[in-house]
Image: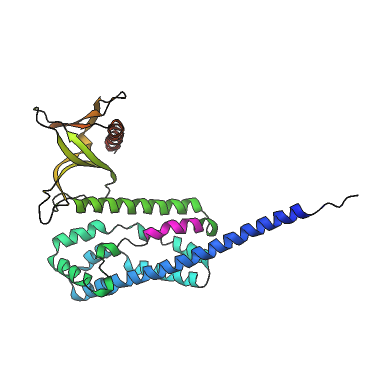
């Protein structure tokens, strides 16, 4: 009788063990990376607390309620990050992340619009901010660069939370919502900085960035086409044109020409239904009709879908 070799079972066992070993290495490597990130993050928080919050409290430059609005729950953020770093240093990845999940709502606060508003209103705060940013500890960074806390590391946490914490779907959705809000805040801030001056308020609570691109405006009286940059948001459409290239301060910026509210808008495709070259969209407002043209068929179709969806979402509110 032939002896049956146990090799297949050994190979299988080794495969499982190898898999576990690979996971452990990956888990250890990720924990190390997260610990380094936490240490950097704590230094970043400490900069804002030391050179902004503490001094502003002492000087009384901002009222306590305004200070809380601008800088948010900074002490709580510092505490949550410090506790997580202590857990990571001891190798307690699971408990550390489980405890961290209880603080996720702290990271949902967007501070961009509050900061920009105070910079416009408060001359003393504006001067103080510029002075503090010249300190060597800031290494050329502005306050706005330090306020978007931790979002860039949350994606890393999701992969580990799935192994360390129960109810991962709920936790992952929490993190994804925060990341979406973070990305949207960055887009709003980017567009705000692109536009000349502060008359057009892009940074508005509840507003979502959708898309942007160049389109030609067809005039009603047979004039030449006007090429404009359009920014589509969840509630408005902004039309802008480039500033003069020789302007000393605004050569790389755009000048806002019009802001169109979407709650009173209807969108129609005049032509571009077939595989023709480009198309024409009609946007009807109570006191104006806007004709937008593109020579790119895919571009006009994408704009039509985006505009229709944005207007429809306004109707359901």
Task: Point out residue 263 in the picture as x, y percentages from the top left corner.
Answer: 22, 37
Region of the chain picked out in magenta, as a range: 150-160
Q: Main secondary structure of the magenta part?
A: helix
Q: List the single residue furthest toward the right.
A: 1
Residue 70 against residue 284 in the figure, above or below: below
Task: Point out residue 291 in the picture as x, y percentages from the top left corner.
Answer: 18, 30
> Is residue 234 something that shows in the picture?
no
Q: Which residue is nearer to you in this view: 151 or 299?
A: 299
Q: Which residue is nearer to you in this view: 194 or 248?
A: 248
Task: Point out residue 143 in the picture as x, y percentages from the top left corner.
Answer: 25, 65
Task: Point out residue 65 in the picture as x, y percentages from the top left corner.
Answer: 23, 65
Residue at 46% x, 65% y is 33
Q: How many numbered callouts?
A: 0
Residue at 27% x, 65% y is 71
Residue at 20% x, 34% y is 264
Tell me where residue 186 sits by quadrant.
bottom left
Q: Which residue is nearer to you in this view: 232 or 141?
A: 141
Tell whether position 153 is magenta. Answer: yes
Left/right of residue 81 with respect to residue 226 in the rendered view = right
Residue 140 against residue 276 in the figure, above or below: below
Q: Which residue is nearer to you in this view: 66 or 17?
A: 17
> Is residue 153 something that shows in the picture?
yes
Tell whether position 223 is magenta. Answer: no
Residue 291 against residue 258 in the figure, above or below: above
């Amino acid at each position: 009788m032939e002896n049956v070799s146990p090799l297949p079972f050994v190979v299988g066992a080794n495969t499982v063990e190898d898999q576990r070993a690979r996971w452990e290495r990956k888990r250890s490597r990720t924990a190390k990376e997260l610990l380094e990130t936490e240490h950097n993050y704590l230094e970043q928080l400490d900069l804002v607390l030391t050179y902004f919050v503490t001094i502003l409290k002492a000087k009384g430059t901002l009222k306590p309620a305004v200070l809380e609005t601008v800088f948010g729950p900074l002490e709580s953020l510092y505490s949550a990050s410090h506790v997580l770093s202590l857990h990571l240093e001891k190798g307690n990845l699971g408990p550390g992340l489980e405890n961290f999940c209880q603080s996720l709502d702290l990271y949902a606060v967007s501070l961009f619009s509050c900061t920009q508003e105070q910079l416009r209103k408060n001359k003393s705060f504006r001067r103080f901010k510029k002075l503090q940013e010249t300190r060597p500890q800031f290494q050329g960074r502005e306050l706005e660069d330090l306020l978007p806390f931790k979002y860039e590391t949350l994606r890393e946490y999701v992969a580990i939370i799935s192994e360390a914490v129960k109810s991962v779907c709920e936790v992952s959705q929490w993190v994804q919502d925060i990341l979406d809000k973070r990305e949207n805040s960055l887009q709003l801030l980017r567009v705000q900085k692109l536009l000349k001056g502060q008359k057009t308020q892009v940074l508005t609570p509840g507003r979502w960035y959708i898309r942007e691109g160049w389109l030609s405006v067809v005039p009603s009286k047979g004039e030449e086409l006007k090429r404009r940059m359009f920014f589509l948001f969840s509630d408005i459409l902004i039309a802008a044109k480039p500033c003069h290239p020789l302007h000393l301060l605004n050569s790389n910026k755009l000048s806002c020409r019009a802001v169109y509210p979407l709650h009173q808008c209807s969108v129609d495709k005049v032509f571009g239904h077939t595989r023709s070259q480009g198309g024409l969209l009609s946007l009807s407002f109570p006191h104006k009709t806007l004709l937008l043209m593109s020579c790119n068929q895919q571009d006009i179709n994408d704009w039509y879908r985006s505009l229709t969806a944005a207007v429809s979402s306004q109707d359901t509110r």
